[in-house]
């Protein structure tokens, strides 16, 4: 059995020839692990006992009252590590162990994926190297310290925009040189095949749990599911179980930065066209000559000029609707959720909350909205507070 290499016209394997055997080895190992009882039992137990799954589906009563509709939060922020990235870190970390790899490399933006990999590396006793843009090292310092505490080596990347896309490029470079003993643990549903499928599969537990819990609590499916979109792993994670349920609106929220009409945003689906980047064909921010444009967002985890290929496909087939929230809207939502519920969201997740605020204007109190709270906001407290002060919020 082989996995599909494409989603419609999107996806594929646009990499140097040298990496093809490694990607084929990865696909084969992943397919074997899917059918391996021992692997699945070990992963299930790690997700439960180490990471704390299942996470809660919480009816946010105060926010619901404020917005005039029924809001549920999928609490991925409560997962060990503080974000949904742990699901994929554990899955692929275990896969690396089963493949006998002795070195794990990873890219990170917000540092949440980097931390998930660092903790898995510590736990499994595998040497871990995390590539991170210097801009992100500065704005997500807390996660840099957390990764180092777990024994990971951080390699600062000072190329290009010094953010996630440059860290991914450096990882691919490292992998080409050290392909034999190294596992590249990619953190989102992007990159060359088979990563988009592997990462989606390790994240799809989010939506499966939501489906079960919302049926138990409400006896019906939600009307809307909202997730922020960087590469797209928390979005695919929560959407996947609902793709066939066409009455459920699936909404991806991209980083609108300083506004979609400015140069400073990271909304690849809302404002770009397909192009090849990081080993895949997908929506890509690019100039008229096809040169990759730099993305911008206040949120490091969303600051990426492309998106996973399955989301591009779901956009074109109109199953997922894409929109954007600006930095300012996300900051307002960051404050709103903290004040109404005592839950501080990651700035990434605050983009999804911001869209719920906008959407609620057209909803009534019977409408059910599930927001994927992909991570917690401890890492953002200082930057967000400063930014809120600059905006003169009280
Ligand atoms: C908390 C959180 N949410 C969302 C994202 C965006 O990634 P993805 O689109 O793959 O879910 C990140 C990325 O670091 C993150 O840390």
Image (cartoon, rainbow, N blue to C red):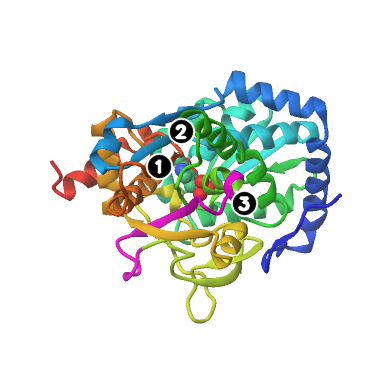
Please give the name of the residue rendered at 79% of the width and 57% of the height, measured from the top-left corner: 20
In this view, the residue farthest toward the top is: 49
Q: What separation in Å lies between label 2 and label 1 (alpha carbons)?
A: 9 Å
Q: Are marks 3 and 1 in contact (CB under 8 Å)?
A: no
**Which residue position holds label 3?**
244
Asked whether residue 109 appears in the rendered view, the answer is no
Q: What separation in Å lies between label 3 and label 2 (alpha carbons)?
A: 19 Å
Q: What separation in Å lies between label 3 and label 1 (alpha carbons)?
A: 18 Å
The vertical placement of 370 against 2, above or below, is above
Q: Which label's residue is closer to the chain start, 3 or 2?
A: 2
* Mark 3 burial class by Cα count in 10 Å: few <14, some 14-19, many 20+: few
Please give the name of the residue rendered at 65% of the width and 39% of the height, measured from the top-left corner: 202
* x and y, in percent, of residue 130 in the image: 57, 41
**Which residue position holds label 2?**
218
123 lies left or right of 341:
right
Q: Are marks 2 and 1 in contact (CB under 8 Å)?
A: yes
* x and y, in percent, of residue 157 in the image: 51, 51
The vertical placement of 202 against 307, above or below, is above
Q: Which label's residue is closer to the chain start, 2 or 1?
A: 2
Asked whether residue 204 appears in the rendered view, the answer is yes
**Residue stretch in magenta:** 241-264
* x and y, in percent, of residue 123 in the image: 63, 23
* x and y, in percent, of residue 162 in the image: 46, 55
146 vs 255, nearest the viewer: 255
Q: Is residue 344 magenta?
A: no
24 vs 138, nearest the viewer: 24
220 lies left or right of 121:
left
**Which residue position holds label 1?**
368
Q: Is residue 245 magenta?
A: yes
Q: Tell me the element at label 2.
A: helix
């Amino acid at each position: 059995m082989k996995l599909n290499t494409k989603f419609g016209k999107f996806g594929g394997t646009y990499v140097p020839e040298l990496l093809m055997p490694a990607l084929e080895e990865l696909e084969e190992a992943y397919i074997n692990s899917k059918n391996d009882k021992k692997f699945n039992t070990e992963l299930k137990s790690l997700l439960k006992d180490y990471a704390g799954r299942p996470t809660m589906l919480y009816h946010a009563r105060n926010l619901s009252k404020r917005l005039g509709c029924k809001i549920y939060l999928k609490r991925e922020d409560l997962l060990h590590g503080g974000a949904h990235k742990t699901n994929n870190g554990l899955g692929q970390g275990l896969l690396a162990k089963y493949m006998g790899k002795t070195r794990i490399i990873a890219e990170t933006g917000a540092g949440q994926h980097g931390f998930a990999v660092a903790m898995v590396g510590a736990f499994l006793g595998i040497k871990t190297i995390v590539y991170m843009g210097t801009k992100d090292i500065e704005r997500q310092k807390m996660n840099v310290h957390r990764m180092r505490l777990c024994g990971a080596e951080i390699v600062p990347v000072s190329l290009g925009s010094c953010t996630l896309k440059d860290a991914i490029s450096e990882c691919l470079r490292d992998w080409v040189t050290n392909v034999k003993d190294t596992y590249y643990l990619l953190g989102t549903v992007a990159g060359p095949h088979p990563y988009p499928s592997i990462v989606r599969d390790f994240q799809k537990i989010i939506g499966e749990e939501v489906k079960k819990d919302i049926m138990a609590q409400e006896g019906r499916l939600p009307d809307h599911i909202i997730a922020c979109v960087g590469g797209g792993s928390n979005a695919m994670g929560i959407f996947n179980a609902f793709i066939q349920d066409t009455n459920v609106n699936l909404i991806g929220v991209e980083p609108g930065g300083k506004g979609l009409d400015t140069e400073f945003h990271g909304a690849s689906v809302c404002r770009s066209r397909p192009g090849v980047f990081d080993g895949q064909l997908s929506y890509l921010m690019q100039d008229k000559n096809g040169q990759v444009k730099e993305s911008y967002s206040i949120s490091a985890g969303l600051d990426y000029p492309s998106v996973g290929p399955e989301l591009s496909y779901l956009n074109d087939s109109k199953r997922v609707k894409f929109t954007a929230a600006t930095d300012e809207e996300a900051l307002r939502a960051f404050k709103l959720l903290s004040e109404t519920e005592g839950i501080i969201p990651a700035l990434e997740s605050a983009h999804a909350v911001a869209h719920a605020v906008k959407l609620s204007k057209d909803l009534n109190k019977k409408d059910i909205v599930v927001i994927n709270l992909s991570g917690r906001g401890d890492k953002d407290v200082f930057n967000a507070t400063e930014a809120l002060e600059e905006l003169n919020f009280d």
